[in-house]
Amino acid sequence: MDTRRLETLRTLNVLYVEDDPATRDELAQILELWIDHVHTAENGQVGLERFRAVRPDIVVTDIQMPVLNGLAMSTRIRASHPDQPIIVLSAYNDVEFLFSAIDIGIDQYVTKPVNVERLLAKLADMAEDIRARRERRRNQRLLEQYRQLVDASAIVTKLDRDGRITYVNDHFCEHTGYEKGELIDSDIRRLRHPDETKDLSGALWQGILDGERWAGIVKNQTRSGALFVVESSLVPIFDDNGQVEEVVCLDVDITDFYLNYEGLLDTLSCSQRSLQEQTHFLDEYKRALDLGTCICITDIQGRILGSNKQFASLLGYDAKSLSARLLADITTGNHEHCFRDFASRIDAQCSEVMNFRHRDGSERTFSVVYIPLRDLQGEITSVILGCQDVTESMRLTRDVLETQRELLLVMGEVVETRSRETGRHVKRVAEIAHLLALQSGLSKEQAEMLKTTAPIHDVGKVGIADAILHKPGKLDPAEYESIKTHAEIGYRILSTIDRPLVAMAARIAYEHHENYDGSGYPRGLKGEEISIEGRIVAIADVLDALSQKRIYKSAWDSAAIHEFMREQRGIKFDPALVDLVFAHWDEILDIRDRYRDN
């Protein structure tokens, strides 16, 4: 027998029922050479129990057995699983039982004594059939899931060869205002807009009937007569003879986009621009519309030239009432920098989060991309603002951040209470870290996050024994190794919370004792392997600690601290940050004076 066929048996799950122990063990051992999962049972009753437990692909059973014979077991199996594949092993004197086997639908049997090659061939045939049936079921499930997916996401219509509607989905009814019963068996041409051709006898429809797909823009009208524009894909469906039996239409509603485009065409056609200029600006507008349909158009001074329905309605206006107003009238903050950028750089583009004032006085937050539009000479004449309303997501983000800040504040108070001698150390570290963050080029948001998280850089000291934490003298080597573990303890405490602020706090707790040259702890990170937050807090922590009196040391004067920082530049500390410390030395001293220990 071809061994490649036998390989199809490898993943089978087979139940073998036989009452004779020697026969059962011998055949089971042979089957296990080719089949990964072979289960055995000594009679029909045990066989039923094993069947329910392992749900085999194929059952191989002897006929005559005590307690419950093989045919009785097969009958019960077929009652609950009519398609279950079963092979009956029959002796020559079992002829009367074979008729019973045929009655219950078993048509696979092997005579005893068993010819192993014949049995394996039967199993291989059945395995191929099982695989084919599974593949068919899988394909059917996939097709059904694809159908459901398309039905849920697209506007779907089915047509017969004459263009009569045989099916519409719920989305189609929602967009057109029709009930399904009004449309089934009606001509698709009743939905076409008066501007759209209603000829189904031309080359386009004939091409679809010949098996060609078609995609394009189609103007329909709703039940109330309103314009309904779709980007339509017509897909022919073939029967078993290769003939097109129906056509499926998959549509996407682009009515708003189309109206925006038409409005721009009207504006351009009424202008005094040349045909070349109109064509150029039309391409510019199309590019902007491709980026989003919630738009506002201004001149280079920020005066609103026009807006679409989506933009105006989000702010409680109609589009006409916004025309000629300054952008500054409906926004908060200063956005002139974006317009200045356009004037100075030919490839300028600006994006930011902007707060707009709703007509009712409330604020809406938009994510805005400024897109400059240029004339034929390359000069910017107007700007399109592509907007997305992010009010709700920004509110949720602020709520989450506030919750994280409250959590870190509580932790900071715990650290201060536990480390009694630090006084207002954590406050000074936060302020110095904030200063260095801004001066090193981090954004205002990142600097604020660092200011919030820096106070709990020593949170891991909650896991250090009081006797070590508050020891008045120098620590011995074992005590020093113990206190060094606070970096890892702090990281373990904070890293279990998957939130941006807490994640930054975890990095700082882990890395604020790492040295720039790699000689620090706990991981011996080097240079930029240490996060910028860890490098900043490391220098802020030491800078302040040296200036303060502790139970185990006196305060250092400014000159000594300055010299220490110079010596440790590039060794313990990031050299660029040390340079910033020297450049802003007076500001750091002012922070120390403002937040002195009481």
Image: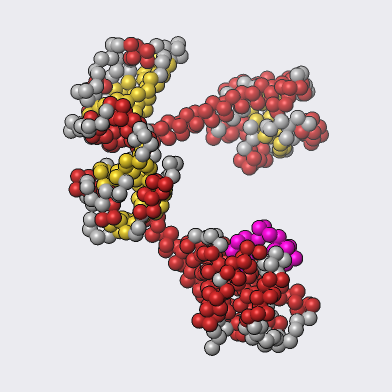
Q: Quadrant of the N terminus?
A: top right
Check the image and report above or below for 493 versus 218.
below
Q: Residue at x 75, y 77 (%)?
A: 480
What is the chief secondary structure element of the magenta stretch?
Answer: loop
Which is nearer the eye, 113 or 476? 476
Q: Which residues are magenta?
A: 515-537
The percent position of residue 361, horizontal first and vertical second, equals 24, 60
Indicate yes or no whether the magenta region holds residue 531: yes
For this view, does 240 lie left or right of residue 381?
right
Q: Position of residue 580 (x, y in %)?
A: 59, 67
Q: Answer with left or right where residue 28 lies relative to residue 313.
A: right
Look at the image and tell me whether residue 556 can be seen.
Answer: yes
Is 374 included in the stretch rendered in magenta?
A: no
On the image, which quarter does residue 562 sit in?
bottom right
Q: Residue 195 in the image: x percent, y percent?
A: 21, 23
Q: Quadrant of the C terminus?
A: bottom right
